[in-house]
Amino acid sequence: MYPSRFSYEAPDTVEEAIELLRRGQGEAKVLAGGQSLLPMMKLRFASPGTLIDINNIPGLDYHRADSDGTYRIGALCRHAQLEKSPDLAASQPTMAAAAHTVADPIVRNRGTLVGSICHADPQGDWASVMISLGASVVAKGPTGVRSVAVADFVSGPFQTVLASDELAVEAVVPAPVGVRAGGYLKLERRVGDFATAGVAVSVEFSGSSVARAGIGLTGVGSSTINAAEAAAALVGGSLSETDIAAAAELAAAASRPRSDHRGSESYKRHIVATFVSRILTSLQLSTQEVA
C-alpha cells in the first residue's frame, strides 16, 4: 500500500522545524529515523499532511556526558551509535544493556532514541529504560523550552504530551546520586520481534545501600509502565533476598498485560517478576564481589 499524499520539508534549523510544525496545525509529523513512522504511513495508520525531515539540522546527533555526570542524547543520535559507544558502556549500564536489543541491525542504523520515545509504542525499549533512569525529554516550541520527565511524557499508547508545534530535541539522564548499576532484559520470540515482556532496572548505590532505584516495564500494558512502588521498595536496603523478592512481586503487580499469541496474562507477569529478580540478583552478586 502507498501512503496518502503529503508535502515534504527539510529544514536546516530547529527554529525552522518548529515554524513548520506551527504551520502544520497538528497535521505535520517529524521524520528522524522513520523506522516506525514510514511503515505506519504505508499502511495508512498515519496520514500526515506534511512530513518534516530534521536530518539536515546539524548538531543533533550527539550523545555525551556533562562534567557533572548528566548524560544527553540528541534527537538524531541513532540506536547504533549508542550500541557501539564505549562511553555509554562505561557510564550507563542500563542503556548499554538495552541498546543491542532494539529491533534489528537495520532499524538500529537509522532509528533514534528520542524518536522511539516520541513514538510511544508500549513495546518500545527506550521509554522503559529512560523511566528507570529518571530521564526527561527536552522540547522546544514557539513559546520556549520545557523539560518533561519520561514517566509523564508518555501519556498512552502512541501518545505523548508533546504539543503539535513542539520538537523533542534531546533526552537527558540526570547525574547519578551514587554508583550507577542496572540492566535490561527482554523476552522475544525471535530477534527483532515485539517484546513479550521487558524490564529495565537502574540502581544507584551509596556504599552497600541503595540510594535510588527505578524500574520500567516494556510490553505489559497499554503504555510503558513506571513500577515506582517496586523501585521504592529497594531504596535504603542492600539488595537482600527479601528486598529483591518484594521488588519482583510489586513489579509484577504493577504490570497490566493481556493474554495474546505471545503468552497469557499470568505468564507475562511471571516473566516480569523473573526478570526483575534476575537483574537485581546479578547486581547483588556484583556488589558482593566489589566488597
Image (cartoon, rainbow, N blue to C red):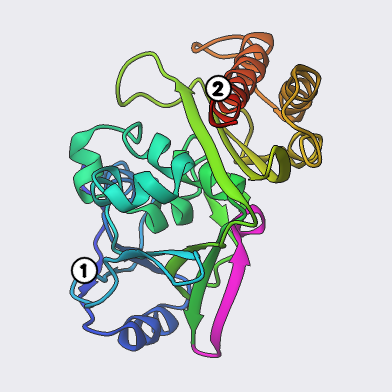
Q: Nearer the viewer, residue 2 or 219?
A: 219
Left or right of 153 in this view: 119: left
- Taking the view exactly as shown, the residue that stands out farthest to the front is 291
Q: Nearer the viewer, residue 161 or 253?
A: 253
Q: Is residue 213 visible?
A: yes
Name the residue located 35 percent from the left edge and 31 percent from the top edge: 101
Q: Are marks 2 and 1 in contact (CB under 8 Å)?
A: no
The span picked out in magenta is: 142-153
Left or right of 258 in this view: 236: right
Q: Mark 2 belongs to which amino acid?
A: Ser
Residue at which label 1 appears = 55
Name the residue located 81 percent from the left edge and 35 percent from the top edge: 233
Residue 209 found in image quarter: top right
Residue 12 coordinates in the image, percent (x, y): 21, 83
Q: Is residue 272 above or below residue 211?
A: above
Q: Count residues near mark 1 (Cα–Cα under 10 Å), then give few for <14, some for 14-19, many for 20+.
A: some
Q: Secondary structure at mark 2?
A: helix
Residue 33 coordinates in the image, percent (x, y): 26, 55
Label located before the other in sequence (2 or 1): 1
Q: Nearer the viewer, residue 190 or 121?
A: 190
Q: Count residues near mark 2 (Cα–Cα under 10 Å), then give few for <14, some for 14-19, many for 20+.
A: few
Name the residue located 31 percent from the left edge and 87 percent from the top edge: 16
Residue 175 coordinates in the image, percent (x, y): 56, 62
Task: Look at the image and say whether residue 54 sits in the magenta stretch.
Answer: no
Q: Is residue 164 visible?
A: no
Residue at which label 2 appears = 282
Q: Mark 1 belongs to which amino acid?
A: Asn
